[in-house]
Image: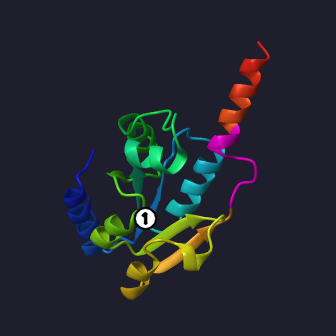
C-alpha cells in the first residue's frame, strides 16, 4: 500500500507525463457488480484511476459495528488486482477531503446516489480546473443488499 505522500508523488508524475488522473473513493467492503461497472466507467474517463479507500476504523464509523467485513489490506489487494485500478490509498478520516487536497486529481468521480453539490472535495478539484463526474447507480447492487441476502438465507437453514 502506498502512503499518502507516495501517492501524491505518483499522481504528480502521472500528470507531468500528460496523464489525466481520476479519483474516486469508497469502502468497497464486498466487491460486487455495481462496483465493477462503476470502476470501469470511472477508469474510462481518463488515463489513471486512483481509489481512496476508507480505513477499517473509518468504515466502522460510517457503516456501524460488524463492518468492514474485510480488512483494508484485503480490500486493497482485491481492488489492486483489477486492471482498471492503478493504485489504492487508504485514508482514516470520515471523508476523503484531505486526501483529495493532497492528490489534486483531474477528475473526481462519485456514484449516482450523489448530487454534485454534496460531493466532498468538489471545490478542490474545480478550483484547479478539474471535473466532477457522476456515474449512474446500478440498481439493486449494494453491499447492504448482499449482506441482507446472506443473513436471510442463513436463517432458512
Q: Is residue 58 visible?
A: yes
User: On the picture, is 96 further left or further right than 45?
Assistant: left
Q: In which quarter of the view is residue 144 placed?
A: top right
User: On the picture, is 8 further left or further right than 65?
Assistant: left
Residue 39 x %, y %: 54, 55
Instruction: Give the quarter of the figure containing the N terminus.
Output: top left
Q: Which residue is mark 1?
A: 23
Residue 17 x %, y %: 27, 72
Q: Is residue 45 visible?
A: no
In the rendered view, how is the structure colored? rainbow
Residue 142 within the segment the image draws in magenta? yes
Residue 129 x %, y %: 40, 87
Q: Residue furthest right?
A: 156
The residue lying at 41 percent from left, 49 percent from top is 58
Q: Main secondary structure of the magenta part?
A: loop
User: On the picture, is 10 further left or further right than 41?
Assistant: left
Instruction: Give the quarter of the figure containing the C terminus.
Output: top right
- Residue 99 vertical placement versus 75 (above, below): below
The residue lying at 69 percent from left, 27 percent from top is 150
- Residue 29 vertical placement versus 25 (above, below): above
Q: Nearer the viewer, residue 111 or 120?
A: 120
User: On the picture, is 3 further left or further right than 55?
Assistant: left
The residue lying at 62 percent from left, 52 percent from top is 37
The residue lying at 24 percent from left, 61 percent from top is 10
Residue 101 within the segment the image draws in magenta? no
SS for callout 1? strand
Q: Label 1: how many residues lie within 10 Å, few (<14), some (14-19) or many (20+)?
A: many
Q: Nearer the viewer, residue 106 or 90?
A: 90
Residue 96 x %, y %: 39, 63
Q: Which residues are magenta?
A: 137-145
Q: Nearer the viewer, residue 134 or 29?
A: 29
Amino acid at each position: 500500500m502506498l502512503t499518502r505522500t507516495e501517492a501524491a508523488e505518483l499522481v504528480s508524475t502521472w500528470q507531468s507525463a500528460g496523464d489525466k488522473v481520476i479519483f474516486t473513493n469508497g469502502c468497497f467492503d464486498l466487491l460486487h457488480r455495481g462496483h465493477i461497472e462503476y470502476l470501469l466507467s470511472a477508469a474510462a474517463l481518463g488515463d489513471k484511476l486512483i481509489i481512496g479507500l476508507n480505513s477499517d476504523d473509518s468504515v466502522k464509523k460510517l457503516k456501524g459495528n460488524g463492518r468492514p467485513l474485510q480488512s483494508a489490506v484485503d480490500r486493497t489487494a482485491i481492488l489492486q488486482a483489477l486492471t482498471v485500478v492503478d493504485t489504492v490509498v487508504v485514508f482514516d478520516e470520515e471523508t476523503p477531503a484531505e486526501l483529495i487536497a493532497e492528490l489534486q486529481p483531474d477528475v473526481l468521480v462519485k456514484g449516482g446516489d450523489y448530487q454534485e453539490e454534496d460531493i466532498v472535495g468538489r471545490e478542490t478539484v474545480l478550483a484547479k480546473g478539474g471535473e466532477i463526474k457522476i456515474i449512474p447507480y446500478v440498481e439493486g447492487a449494494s453491499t447492504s443488499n448482499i449482506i441482507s441476502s446472506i443473513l436471510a438465507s442463513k436463517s432458512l437453514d
